[in-house]
Image: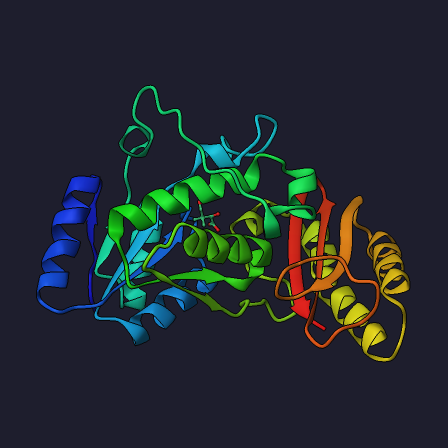
Amino acid sequence: MQSPTTITSVGELRALTENWRRNGQRIGLVPTMGALHAGHLSLVALARNRVDRVVVSIFVNPFQFAPHEDFERYPRNIEEDYTRLASAGGTDIVFAPPLGELYPHGFATRIEVAGPARGLEAEFRPHFFSGVATIVAKLLIAATPDIAVFGEKDYQQLLVVRRLALDLGLATEILSAPIVRESDGLALSSRNAYFGTNERRIAGQLNRVLGQVATEIQSGVSIAEGERSGQAALLEAGFDTVDYVAIRDAATLSQLDGPIGNMRVLAAATIGGTRLIDNMPV
Ligand code: PAF
């Protein structure tokens, strides 16, 4: 079992990664906000298979939360995260900086994003992708990894990060890992910790409904009808609100007039005050 070392400053991270690189070692970064679960560990495992050194960052990024969102109550337990990483193995460094290390006094720079950052999540969380792009760019600049790994659960985020790396000419290759699910199909998420028993049961229906929509589209149902029936099925299953059920071009997330070869169905819905997202290929 390998116990990771925790570091908290960008200077230390740079010194370490420069040293690794001098010794010909390749570096992987797994950016997280902590509250680690098996989904995060699968990202670490993927990174470990590709590179010699793995850095897991743990930082709850305030810029990707709106004032009314759950920044304050977002689950934080660095000790538990550390233990989980240590027993899974594969992590060399936990980078867990304090707020002021990444956002020094007077911080005034944001990355503006468009393309795949338009619509879907952005309609309901307008601040979100600019906040994610800013922190991810900062982490990639600080760690200069050869690869960085993101989960497909946040599918739109994954496309935004790929676009960011391409547009800024960053040398890091962006890799993705499949969604890890509970036995009833619920995608693992740090926010699942908020659910009571009944909410948890309803939450498991999101994946089932997405599967149903994907099957409908494959059997010739129109995009509009698939989206409408998905919305209705989620409300029927007990979700309080449905922000969207959308069938999009999987590569760009642009809207579709009719079916194409590579589609993705994505949804966001709220149950008991907790907002869930999920997606799958069609
Ligand atoms: O997916 C997440 O956990 C976060 O959005 C990320 C990529 C770590 C940026 O804060």
Asked whether, in this view, residue 13 is left or right of residue 194, the answer is left
Which quadrant of the structure image shows residue 105? top left
Q: From where the camera sits, is residue 75 visible?
A: no
Q: Nearer the viewer, residue 70 or 260?
A: 260
- Residue depicted at 73% across the width and 60% down the height: 206
Question: Which residue in the rendered view is the most extreme toward the bottom?
Answer: 219
Which quadrant of the structure image shows residue 154? bottom right
Asked whether, in this view, residue 146 is left or right of residue 43, the answer is left
What is the total number of numbered labels drawn onto the structure image?
0
Position of 19 relative to 132 (above/below): below
Which quadrant of the structure image shows residue 159? bottom right
Q: Return the x and y of residue 233 as percentages of the image width and height.
A: 86, 59
Position of 52 relative to 150 (above/below): below
Q: Nearer the viewer, residue 10 or 179?
A: 10
- Residue depicted at 29% across the width and 33% down the height: 98
Q: Return the x and y of residue 97 as percentages of the image width and height.
A: 28, 38
Question: Considering the image in quadrants, where does the N terminus appear?
Answer: bottom left
Q: From where the camera sits, is residue 165 visible?
A: yes
Q: Return the x and y of residue 115 as percentages of the image width and height.
A: 60, 50
- Residue depicted at 81% across the width and 68% down the height: 213
Question: Which residue in the rendered view is the most extreme toward the top?
Answer: 106
Q: Return the x and y of residue 32 as percentages of the image width and height.
A: 40, 51
Asked whether, in this view, residue 179 is left or right of residue 231, the answer is left
Asked whether, in this view, residue 184 is left or right of residue 208, the answer is left
Question: Considering the image in quadrants, where does the C terminus appear?
Answer: bottom right
Q: Nearer the viewer, residue 89 or 232?
A: 232
The type of colouring in the image is rainbow
